[in-house]
Amino acid sequence: MADHEHGNMDITEKEKTFEGFIKASTWVGGIAIAVLIFLAIFNS
């Protein structure tokens, strides 16, 4: 435990994964809103 230095971890892969998650969430949210608007317009 003496070798551990707080705040010295490489998190580049975690940042890339999180960025991908945010992009996917944004796309899914946008598509869901578009589908709801489409259904509201055409009264389905």
Image (cartoon, grey):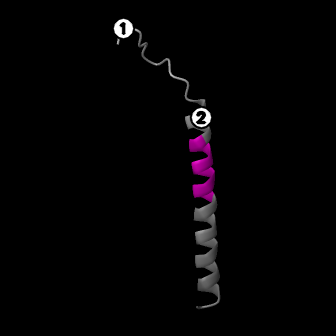
Residue furthest out toward the top: 2
Badge 1 local density, few (<14 within 10 Å), some, or many (20+)? Answer: few
Question: Percent position (x, y) of residue 30?
Answer: 62, 64
Quadrant where the image shows the C terminus: bottom right
User: Is most of the magenta stretch helix, strand or loop?
Assistant: helix
**Is the C-beta separation of discs 2 and 1 under 8 Å?**
no
The x, y position of residue 4, in whole percent, is 41, 13
Badge 2 crowding class, 10 Å Cα cut-off, few under 14, some 14 to 19, many 20 or more, is few
Pick whichever, 41 or 18, lies toward us: 18
Identify the image quadrant of residue 11.
Answer: top right
The residue depicted at 41 percent of the width and 9 percent of the height is 3
Q: Is residue 30 above or below residue 42?
A: above
The residue tagged 2 is: 13
Badge 2 marks a residue whose secondary structure is helix
Q: Is residue 34 above or below residue 5?
A: below
Mark number, residue 2:
1
Q: Is 40 on the left or on the right of 6, as rendered? A: right
Let me know if residue 13 is in the magenta part.
Answer: no
Return the residue nearer the eye: 38 or 23: 23
Going by the numbered disc 1, the residue's amino acid type is Ala
Q: Residue at x 63, y 51 (%)?
A: 23
Whether 35 is drawn above or below 7: the answer is: below
- Decide if residue 23 is on the left or right side of residue 2: right
Label 2 and label 1: CA atoms lie apart by 26 Å
Q: Earlier in the sequence, mark 2 or mark 1?
A: 1
Range shown magenta: 17-26
